[in-house]
Structures are given as structure tokens and as C-alpha cells.
Image: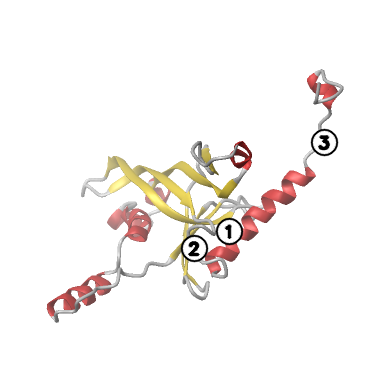
Amino acid sequence: MPLLKAGIVLVDYNTGAVQRLIALQYNPETLTRTLQAQGVGPDSGLHVDQMRLKGPAIETFKLEANLDAADQLDAGDPLATASGIQPQLAALETVIYPTSAQLQQANAMARAGTLEIVPMDAPLALFVWSKERVVPVKITEFSITEEMFDSSLNPIRAKVSLGLRVLTIDDVDFSSVAGSIYLTYQHRKEQLAASAPAGSLAAFGLSVVLP
């Protein structure tokens, strides 16, 4: 079985049509996930309210991806020879940029005296970590450490650190493409939870929970 790649897929927010695929050159060795429960808060009133949840947990991912052009340079790859890993870096970086065409259009509208300029649309980013984890995300952190350069100062080795926030139905329309993908992701979690081996009170040294 071929090694699966992790990465980011950009799709049209309204239709789900794939616009761009960005596979990471090497799968990160670690993936840090943080989940923050959305409770009602300590000032909500009755004690029973403390058991209530306002919505899905806020989930974030942190990962570090390595990029290296050594193999491509050894093979005489013309793109790596001319630009190093700059194309791969640019593919990731431009995910959080509006296009130059959008910037030019916004500038033209501002010069024409448009009273309200609507924020520029961006594709929906999906973080893919196997078929079990395909989630709509927003990139919240992005840093690049370029570590080695060729004679033309093109970077040929770098580390990219990404912070991603999962977009839940609190962030997107319930019936949207993003909402559907998120609900599939949560439903799969529930399926996996249901398949986990059942525990027993005896494992805790208990025969009953209530005294």
C-alpha cells in the first residue's frame, strides 16, 4: 500500500469543487490537537446548567512540516534547480492571501467611491490527515524557517509550522459544504467512540458508582 500524504485541499465554498491540492512533501512526525469544551460558563445560573454544552468543542491542530529539495536537486529537476523549494512554499503561503486580481478589483472599487467593499472570498481549506480526518479549517498560525540555500539564495530546506482551527457548525452554515464535511467528521468520531472496548467498574476498584 502506498504511503498516504497529509495536506490541504482548497475547494469552492459553495459547490465543493476542488480548486487546488497541496500535499505535504513529508508527513509531520507529530500532530498536536487541542480541544476546548464550550460550556455555558460559571455565571449561567442553576447548577444543572453547568452540564450543558453550547456547541461543539473548539478544536485546533498544530503541526510542523519539512520541505527539502535535496532529492530533486540530485536528480537534476529543473524546477528545483531554478527555484529550490520556493514553489512549494508559495503554494502554502498563498492559501492565506487574496489573489492579486481580487486586490486590483478592491482597489478599483475604492477609487470608484464604492461605499462598502465586501471582504474578498477565499476558497474553503480542508485539512486532510487520512480519510478518517477531513475537516474544514482556518489557518491561524503560519511560520517558515528557511534553513539552507543554494548559490542563488533559493531556499532548499525549510520547516513550516501551521496552526489550524477546525470550522464547526458554529462557524459555517449548517447546510453548507463546510457544514456537511464537519458533521461527517464529528459523526465518524462518534462511530469510533461507540466501537471502543467497554470499560468496567471493577477496573476502577468499584462495584457501584453511587454510595
Distance Cα–Cα, label 3 vs label 2: 34 Å
Residue at figure coordinates x 56%, y 64% from the top left:
179
Residue at figure coordinates x 77%, y 40% from the top left:
196
Marks 2 and 1 in Cβ contact (< 8 Å): yes
Dot 2 crowding, Cα within 10 Å, few <14, some 14–19, many 20+: some
Residue identifier under label 3: 198
**Colour basis:** secondary structure
* 68 lies left or right of 128: left
Distance Cα–Cα, label 2 vs label 1: 9 Å
Distance Cα–Cα, label 1 vs label 3: 27 Å
2 vs 1, front mark = 2
Instruction: Pick the residue in front: 133 or 52.
Output: 52
Q: Position of residue 100 (x, y in %)?
A: 25, 70
Residue at figure coordinates x 42%, y 45% from the top left:
163
First in sequence: mark 3 or mark 2? 2
Dot 1 crowding, Cα within 10 Å, few <14, some 14–19, many 20+: many
The amino acid type, in three-letter code, at marker 1 is Tyr
Relative height, residue 70 to residue 101 (above, below)? above
Residue identifier under label 2: 172
Q: Return the mark for residue 182.
A: 1
Q: If the image is split into quadrants, where does the C terminus sit?
A: top right
Q: Secondary structure at mark 3?
A: loop
